[in-house]
Amino acid sequence: MTKKEKKQNKREEKVEEKKVEETKEFLPPLDFVSIVLPFYTQALIKLGQTENPMTQKKEENLDLAKRLIDILDLLKEKTKGNLTPEEEKFLVASIDQLKMIYLEKAKIITP
């Protein structure tokens, strides 16, 4: 292989590496928040608080929202005594906020 061919191969490899780097998806940090956040976000979507990214519309599904809140409550129960104070505070605040929105949407309480 000539020097010119070697240089060309190296350039092609760098271009290929750059393409691979550009197509990689962002990986969130591996922590407790990354477990809670997807359930919280989906609950907000199902409560009609934010647009569904698939349809670009606000939609309500209170049954599914309640199920997602129940999952977070279950997570809170199962992790009791094993979370840092910050993790517990985040989880409790997330659940409390979702429950208030749910109660208002289900017309159980009035704002």
Image (spheres, grey):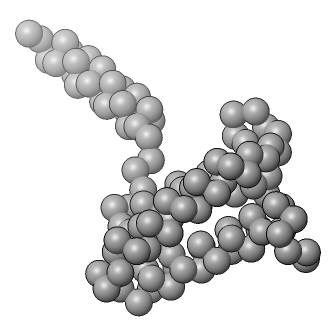
The image quadrant that residue 109 belongs to is bottom right
Quarter of the picture containing the C terminus is bottom right
Say whether residue 41 is visible. Answer: no
Residue lying at 34% horizontally and 74% vertically, measured from the top left: 79
- Which residue is farthest front? 108
- In this view, 72 is above or below 58: below
Residue 54, x across and y down, in percent:
69, 34
Horizontal side of 7 relative to 67 (left or right) equals left
Residue lying at 64% horizontally and 57% vertically, measured from the top left: 66
Residue 5, x across and y down, in percent:
19, 12
Residue 62, x across and y down, in percent:
73, 51
Towards the viewer: 84 or 10: 84
* Total numbered labels placed on residues in the image: 0
Horizontal side of 21 relative to 97 (left or right) equals left
- Which residue is farthest top? 1
- In this view, 102 is above or below 63: below
Residue lying at 35% horizontally and 81% vertically, measured from the top left: 80
Horizontal side of 77 relative to 13 (left or right) equals right
Quarter of the picture containing the N terminus is top left
Say whether residue 25 is visible. Answer: yes
Horizontal side of 85 relative to 13 (left or right) equals right
Towards the viewer: 5 or 91: 91
Residue lying at 36% horizontally and 67% vertically, measured from the top left: 31
Residue 45, x across and y down, in percent:
71, 50
